[in-house]
Amino acid sequence: MIILETKRLILRTWKEQDLDPLSAINQDPLVCEFLPKIGDRATTKTLIQRFMNHYKKYGFTAYVVELKKNGEFIGFVGLLVTSFEAHFTPAIEMGWRLASQHWGKGYATEAAKAVVDLAFTTLKLEEVVSFTVENNSRSRRVMEKIGMHHHPHDDFDHPKLPKSSSLCRHVLYRLSRAST
């Protein structure tokens, strides 16, 4: 089911045939540079099921992103209830993951802006957050382009990662409905 359309993209719910293209993305070392592990097919299947269950429970999720011109699956962008406890939770987090061959074309920003509109206009959320590893400049740029703000006092160690991990320290960005 199509949820959102932008000038170049379609954001929709998940289908069984999305497993192969998402598995390919999840096995790309460039895409997984700032993730704790590279996802295999079974992990990807579990992730898709999590997204589908989240949609049934909350009415929103991480959505498939397709190119409008040819229907190509290029990744996902969306909203999830944060699945761990931290100083900023409970929260709704915005996240994205696109195939590396589609980086640098503005797709993540375009899709994320549409999801921000969904969050504040349709879902009437008060705030969304996004977080990533400190060194993930690509994701941080998307956060800034969609109007999110970083306050260093909000940065945190991700509770699902060991303190010794180079991926443990995260930066937190926020966007409130009042600021849009």
Image: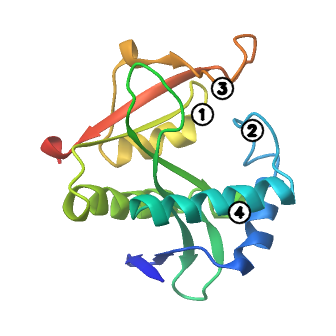
The residue wearing badge 1 is 136
* Residue 19 spot, x, y in % from top left: 76, 70
Q: Which residue is mark 4?
A: 101
Q: Which amino acid type is shown beneath numbered disc 3? A: Lys
Residue named by callout 3: 160
Q: Residue at x 46, y 22 (%)?
A: 86
The residue located at (65%, 75%) in the rendering is 73
Q: Residue furthest left?
A: 178
The residue type indicated by label 1 comes to Asn
Depth check: 68 or 163 in front? 163
Q: CA distance from mark 3 to mark 2?
A: 17 Å
Picture layout, residue 70 above or below residue 10: below
Circle 3 SS class: loop
Q: Residue at horizontal 18%, vertical 46%?
A: 177
Identify the residue position indicated by label 2 in the image: 33
Evaluate if marks 1 and 2 touch, with contact meaning CB atoms under 8 Å apart: yes
Closer to the chain start, of discs 3 and 1, is 1
Q: CA distance from mark 1 to mark 4?
A: 17 Å
Q: Is residue 167 above or below residue 79?
A: above
* For the residues bearing labels 3 and 1, Cβ distance under 8 angstroms: no
Q: Earlier in the sequence, mark 1 or mark 4?
A: 4
Q: Secondary structure at mark 2?
A: loop
Please name the amino acid that badge 4 sits on: Gln
Query: How far, Cα to Cα, is label 3 from label 1?
Result: 18 Å
Q: Quadrant of residue 143?
A: top left
State the residue in front, 41 or 50: 50
